[in-house]
Amino acid sequence: MTRILLYSDEPILSKGLESVLRQVEGFELLPTCGSVPCLLDQIARLTPDLVLMDLTPEVTFGVLSEMKHALAHTKIVLWVNAISTELAFQAMGLGVRGILRKTLPTELQVKCLQKVQAGELWFEKALTDSFLCARRVALTQREGQLVSLLAQGLKNKEIATTLMISEGTVKVYLSRLFQKVGVKDRFELALFGLKNLTTGQLPLGEKGHRPGAIPGLRSIVLERPVGGPAATPETPRFATPIRPPVQRHY
């Protein structure tokens, strides 16, 4: 029996999926969670075999990192309307076994969960193709932490305080990251960091935490344009951020 835990902040949508999954032989549906704290609590108490996570603004890189450490044998599938190439790539690196679109027919949604539980992966071809058109920039632990904090909107002085380094050292790191990633300023770097970390909102970390405890990206994935015919309406596209021209500043 496969014990499935569903997390979603859309009660009507989750009720519909619940009714489908309850009819599938071999599936046992656990109580649905409507918030990340509830999800983490249910995972600790119920030890599900598979977690189907709605990609809400609460689901950040930090949450996925925490779940990876908490779930030794539980498989994770992200349930999405759309997802950027960057976040999908980072999610795979954190052990997510599948990315399931909500718009797929119910039989395919069930098939996805069955395949993942059987040990397979579920990623659509359009998504895996987009990985081939992406450029990956590896980051050191400190660089990853700095990008994560920059994406949260922290200023240089706040970043320095959080990482327990000098403000001058932060400026040196930023200058090197601009060249390494190929961006013009902190605004562009923050945009790419945000796309790699989360779906659009990233809660500020608590003050006073240890630098080593700050979730840091291991890499930044940047989409690059590829020549060829335009995509058809049926081909999912993963948008890159629109970057207005701004002057370089630290």
Image (tube, rainbow, N blue to C red):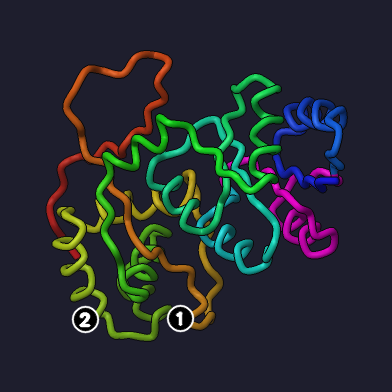
Give the label on residue 168, or none. 2
Q: Is residue 36 magenta?
A: yes
Name the N-terminal-most of marks 2 and 1.
2
Q: Secondary structure at mark 1?
A: helix
| Relative image position of residue 31 (x, y in whole percent) | 86, 45
Residue 99 location, quadrant: top right
Q: Secondary structure at mark 2?
A: helix
Q: Does the magenta run of residues contain 110?
A: no
Camera-side mark, 2 or 1: 1
Residue flagged by tag 2: what amino acid is it? Gly
First to last magenta residue range: 30-57
The residue at the point 67 percent across, 30 percent down is 111
* Quadrant assignment, res 160: bottom left
Identify the residue position indicated by label 1 in the image.
211
Q: Label 1 is placed on what type of residue?
A: Pro
Vertical arrangement, residue 27 with respect to residue 49, above or below? above
